[in-house]
Every structure is written in C-alpha cells, then in structure tokens.
Amino acid sequence: MTMQGPEGKALEGSVDSLITRSKDVQKSLQDFLHKIEQEHATLTWPSVLDNFALLSGQISSLLTAMKSDKTPPLRNYPVVPLKLSQDEDPHLLRLTDGRVSVMSHAEVPDYLRTKPDPEVELAEKQLIAEVGTQADQISMNQVNQFNKQCNKILEKIKNARANWRADVIQSSSTPVTHNPMATNELIATVNYGRGIKANSNQSLGTTSVVL
C-alpha cells in the first residue's frame, strides 16, 4: 500500500531506516556465526567480546530508532496478506532473501502472528513467575545474610564501647597511694631545711637536730 502526503513520506523513510539497521544487525550476526563455525580454532575471547559489543550497539540503535518520536507508530500499520497461494512467489523469495518462498494458509499464522500460541504464552508466564520467585528468595537470603553481618558488627562495637567505659571508670577510681601535702613538706625540708630545729647539749658536747 502506497501512502501519499507527509505521513506517507515519514512512514516510508522510517521503514527504510529500520530496514537498513536490521540488515546491519543481520550482517553482523552472519559474520559472527561464520567466525564461530569456521574460525573457532583461532577465535579469541577479545574478538568475541568485540562482536558482542558491535551487536549490542546495533540492536540498541535499532530500538532507539523504533522508539523515536520521529518514527510513526508502526502498530497502526499492520501487515495483511492480500493473496494466499500454494505456488512459489519469486518476489516474496527475493524480499525475504530466500527464507520464505510461499505465502499460504499454513505459513501466514506463523509469520504474521502478533502473539504466541496460548500454550507457549502460558509456559512463558510460568517461567517468568518461577524466575521472579527465585529472584525474591535469593534477594531475601542476601538481605538476611547482610543483616546478620551488620548485627555482628554492631555487637562488636557495643562490646568495645562497654570495655572502653569500664577502663575509663577503673582508671578514674584508682586509690591514691601518696599524700601530696607530706610530699611537699618533704621537698621543702630537703631543699630549704623547713621544720628543722637545732638543739645543743652542752653537757654532752654534742649537737642534735630535731625535726
């Protein structure tokens, strides 16, 4: 279907840009798969990382272009087959690079579906629920382990604080083993002779010192 006017030009330009980006991703994937299949003996880990980085950048660029405000909402333009046939279609074969040759009643549901089969969708929901439950359990275990470690550290801090306070109290309550006044008097006596009296005994001819 061909659209006229600015809206048609914007849609055509956006689709061309997305096709170009998609082909870039496709080529990078093909090159990477070729390296894995043909050059696995000489393939190095840095080279693998480079290919992953290239693919990641191209896919991010494609998603950014799809989410851009300049890109028309593609969901408003569904693809509807106008003709179904069991015969091989050369034009379709060329458009799909040889991947799809027939657009029949058997292929249309697979190629143009917008939702998976109900069984597949149910299995996907179950897997997502299981992964979410496991993630919650792992998170809770990690939180519990973290809390245990924090409690141990807090207990050590409390014990250290209690021991420090006990040491301070013990050091401040140490009994005094000397008399400061007596010490000062002794120093004054030694240095200045304070408190010393001379007593002369004439009869004995001796002199004694009385403190």
Image (cartoon, rainbow, N blue to C red):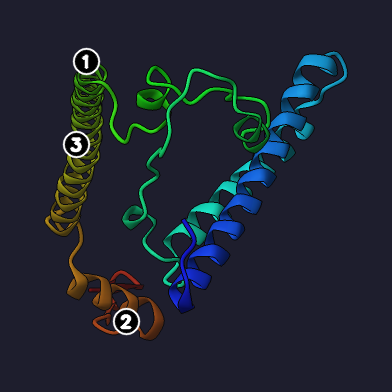
Is 68 located above or below residue 150 in the figure? below
Q: Which label sits on residue 119?
A: 1
Q: Is residue 169 left or right of residue 183?
A: left
Q: Residue at x 60, y 59 (%)?
A: 17
Q: Earlier in the sequence, mark 2 or mark 3?
A: 3
Is 130 located above or below residue 209 in the figure? above
Query: Quarter-wise, where is residue 114 in the image?
Result: top left
Mark 1, secondary structure of its residue: helix
Q: Nearer the viewer, mark 2 or mark 3?
A: 3
Among all residues in the image, which is located at the extreme right?
A: 42
Give me the C-alpha separation between circle 1 and circle 2: 107 Å
Q: Which label sits on residue 147?
A: 3
Mark 2, secondary structure of its residue: helix
Along the line of sight, which residue is nearer the eye, 91 or 161?
Answer: 91
Callout 3 amino acid:
Asn
Callout 2 amino acid:
Ala
Q: Residue at x 40, y 44 (%)?
A: 79
Q: Which label sits on residue 157?
A: none
Give me the C-alpha separation between circle 1 and circle 3: 42 Å
Q: Earlier in the sequence, mark 1 or mark 3?
A: 1
